[in-house]
């Protein structure tokens, strides 16, 4: 609980209507999209940067945690106020400040919903590629803080690759502005990419300038079914050897297709080891060329069936299964733990097989799908959080999955972040010197440990 | 001068043949491609990471500066040992360790020459886009430390966009390994992009894993001559509005063309305000489409002449002028100060006009060329370093140029870095909080101020 004098000061900064202290309100901000939860002491919704400065200065004075929060769609516990304190809900700062069609940039506040941003720039003939699956709820600030990815990452990269400028409030309550509308920039250290992916531990992002690209003229989709997972993997490297980087290269495993077909049947086979959903974009003439090469490569590599969408309706049909995958999983379990162990592209068959073996060993249901083009697979563990015995098996299975990914030269997280869920694995991935360097940076920037404390690093490592 | 006992220890670490102390040797490592120079106390050429660890531990023990050095092509004084100490010459660590054609990655030591790397990966049908003009002498380690760019940056980005993994020795002599072969990675803070562009102040890069892409099947070049600079700028935005991002969009101003024609005549007009050299790449069928659109746009926007290369010979002819530009400048002056003030793309005509006005005001010759597609222009100031009166005018002119770039929403450096040359302008670009944050990071990571001291930041700011 914050002292009444602090609450009074917060009300003075924000206005009564933007300070929330009832149990109902606190519960709403106590969790994200993981099983983690913890009640904050207070929730506030600032309207601008200056209010955030005042809040953070107050937090330093009275030593309480501040946890920035966007859409709450985080998949690693990053927005859970695990040490209580104040949740900074950024939904009111949701203006798209500018779309600069000459310089192909946009400037936004952190609370803008990702999908809203997509629609707005696309109306101008422009394109913002990062497309996390949570984009209808996630915010741009959260996307930057977590360095969100998405299916289009294989061709277009992740959020970090599009951030040209950031205004942020530091953990001591100073406003920093770095970068701007220039595409190239090597003045001083890259604070932009230090903020990006720092999970709200180094600064509260209050304004973002993003690079846009011209919207591709055309796109087309192919669905290819494979009896053997290895043939799907061979197809992926075969396509790339033909000098084509598709926009998306999504793999669904057999378990995923089974669940989808049991939910909203969309014509996926349940007896095949895997399916690739491949999209190509570019100029109309070049997309046709790409699709021709991709279709041929799928067949050459042993696809048992290849469907090429001929129009938007057929395209929607091909994507229907993939889009309902998460719903299909969710309805079959009380909770879906979406992991994102990521491996080098060539190791995708190995990690998928490892996941299947681990699932069998611990008697768990783990449909796996993901962005096979960049090795970013998502094993989804279907659990009953309330079943303690099962959760023990789940924990052991997750341990083994991350170990397998790291043994294959991978990383703990491709796009979900570390948060609370993966802290204990950090020392598996990083040597002590790397962890020490990260922690030294956190300490130098946030001497009072105000911003999102207790995340990324375990206390005593 | 380092104490004899330290020299003895260095000889023990490196072998006598890799420790250099004669005046002649020291002079060779006292300068880069700027007018700055300062003699080091000693130069050593390590063979591996462990030797670097030992050297840096020794430096911390005896408190002497360590300045990492690649090809010495730096354009901001970054590799000049301004406080003496030890120069770490990395030319012996020049192995291309692996090219992974399945994962499209390469792993190299820091001393690999950039152009050698290009040639090696292109033999495998792969492509590493960053192409600093110094690529025949610059090294991959230097490119990462300075976040080198190049003409292809407009389409393909800069060095930082291709670094997936780094092994580095920290300023306290620890080895950190971050990243690897995965394209997506959000585990912990982004130390990779903190090292990249840190100009050798945060770590000695000892191994780099790079992302490669498939080599484009085809490329073609157009040269367009414009009577009016504004028409060239209109052409650039016109092309991009047609959803085409060319591989290069190079602008040469009138003064540049005059100098080229006075050196190696290559058919450039000396009475036109500017010329655009535009290259497009991709699949053969798509390159033809792009070239058609670009040619038409040049004409629509008022180009007085448009030459489209029909084969490799014609392409080489079109590039000949641009390629000899620096030579043409160098022969007309004792020294060329190549600046790289960078502005948002739409502000290119403004910055070029500002540069011309400033040059006239201070009676200087300043041919300007550069990467207009990303706003990264290079005013090249032709000077006699020995002429003190002229150098005063030069200093005043450079002050005004940077002021103009920042006023246009630009940055001090698009691809050359800050080093010594631009330290005094840092407080023009950055607020105190941003500078404090950068300096706090430096201090946290390098408590004894061992690595490349005296760079980027002025002492008392």
Image (cartoon, coloured by chain):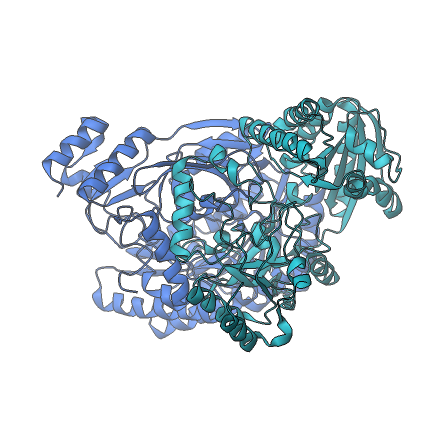
Chain colours: A blue, B cyan
Left or right: A337, with B360 as reference point: left
Q: Nearer the viewer, residue B411 or B276?
A: B411
- In which quadrant of the rendered view does residue B108 lie? bottom right
Residue depicted at x 66% and y 27%: B355
Left or right: B390, with A103 as reference point: right
- Total of numbered circles in the picture? 0
Q: How far from the left and from the top, in percent, is residue A401?
A: 40, 68
Q: How far from the left and from the top, in percent, is residue B57?
A: 45, 68
Query: Is any part of residue B246 visible from this angle?
Result: yes
Residue A138 position (above or below residue B143): above
Quarter of the picture containing the N terminus of chain B is bottom right
Q: Nearer the viewer, residue B426 or B215?
A: B426
Residue depicted at x 23% and y 28%: A14
Left or right: A158, with B286 as reference point: left
Residue A411 position (above or below residue A42): below
- State the residue lying farthest toward the left: A4
Residue A285 position (above or below residue A300): above
Q: How far from the left and from the top, in percent, is residue B321?
A: 83, 39
Q: Nearer the viewer, residue A302 or B184?
A: B184
- In which quadrant of the rendered view does residue A144 lie? top left
Quarter of the picture containing the C terminus of chain B is top left
Query: Is any part of residue A408 visible from this angle?
Result: no
Q: How far from the left and from the top, in percent, is residue A347?
A: 53, 67
């Amino acid at each position: 609980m914050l002292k009444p004098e602090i609450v009074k000061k917060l009300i003075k900064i924000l206005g009564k209507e933007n300070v929330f202290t009832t149990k109902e309100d606190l519960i709403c901000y106590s969790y994200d999209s993981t099983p983690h939860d913890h009640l904050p002491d207070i929730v506030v919704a600032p309207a601008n940067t200056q209010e955030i400065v005042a809040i953070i200065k107050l937090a330093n004075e009275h030593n309480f945690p501040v946890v920035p929060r966007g859409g709450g769609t985080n998949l690693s516990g990053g927005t859970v106020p695990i040490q209580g304190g104040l949740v900074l809900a950024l939904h009111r700062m949701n203006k798209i400040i500018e779309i600069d069609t000459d310089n192909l940039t946009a400037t936004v506040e952190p609370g803008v919903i990702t999908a809203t941003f997509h629609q707005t720039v696309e109306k101008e003939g422009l394109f913002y590629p990062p497309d996390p699956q949570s984009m209808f709820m996630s915010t741009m600030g959260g996307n930057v803080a977590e360095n969100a990815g998405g299916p289009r990452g294989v061709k277009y990269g992740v959020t970090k690759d599009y951030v040209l400028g950031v205004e942020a409030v530091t953990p001591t309550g100073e406003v920093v502005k770095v970068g701007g509308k220039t595409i190239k920039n090597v003045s001083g250290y890259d604070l932009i990419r230090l903020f990006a992916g720092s999970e709200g531990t180094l600064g509260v992002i209050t304004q973002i300038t993003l690079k846009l690209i011209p919207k591709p003229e055309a796109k087309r989709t192919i669905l290819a079914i494979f009896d053997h997972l290895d043939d799907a993997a061979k197809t992926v490297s075969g396509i790339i050897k033909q000098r084509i980087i598709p926009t998306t290269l999504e793999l669904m495993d057999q378990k995923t297709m089974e669940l989808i077909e049991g939910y909203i049947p969309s014509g996926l086979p349940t007896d095949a080891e895997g399916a690739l959903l491949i999209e190509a974009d570019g100029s109309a003439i070049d997309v046709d060329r790409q699709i021709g090469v991709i279709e041929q490569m799928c067949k050459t590599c042993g696809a048992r069936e290849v469907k090429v969408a001929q129009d938007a309706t057929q395209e929607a049909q091909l994507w229907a299964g993939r889009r309902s995958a998460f719903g299909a999983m969710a309805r079959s379990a009380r909770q879906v733990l979406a992991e994102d162990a990521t491996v080098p592209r060539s190791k995708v068959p190995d990690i998928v097989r490892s996941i299947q073996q681990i699932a069998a060993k611990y008697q768990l249901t783990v449909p796996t799908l993901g962005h096979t083009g960049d090795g970013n697979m998502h094993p989804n563990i279907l659990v009953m959080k309330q079943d303690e015995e099962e959760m023990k098996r789940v924990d052991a299975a997750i341990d083994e999955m991350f170990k397998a990914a790291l043994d294959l030269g991978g990383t703990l997280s491709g796009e979900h972040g570390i948060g609370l869920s993966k802290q204990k694995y950090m020392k598996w991935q990083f040597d002590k010197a790397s962890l020490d360097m990260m922690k030294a940076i956190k300490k130098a920037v946030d001497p009072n440990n105000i911003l999102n404390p207790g995340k990324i690093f375990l206390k005593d490592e």
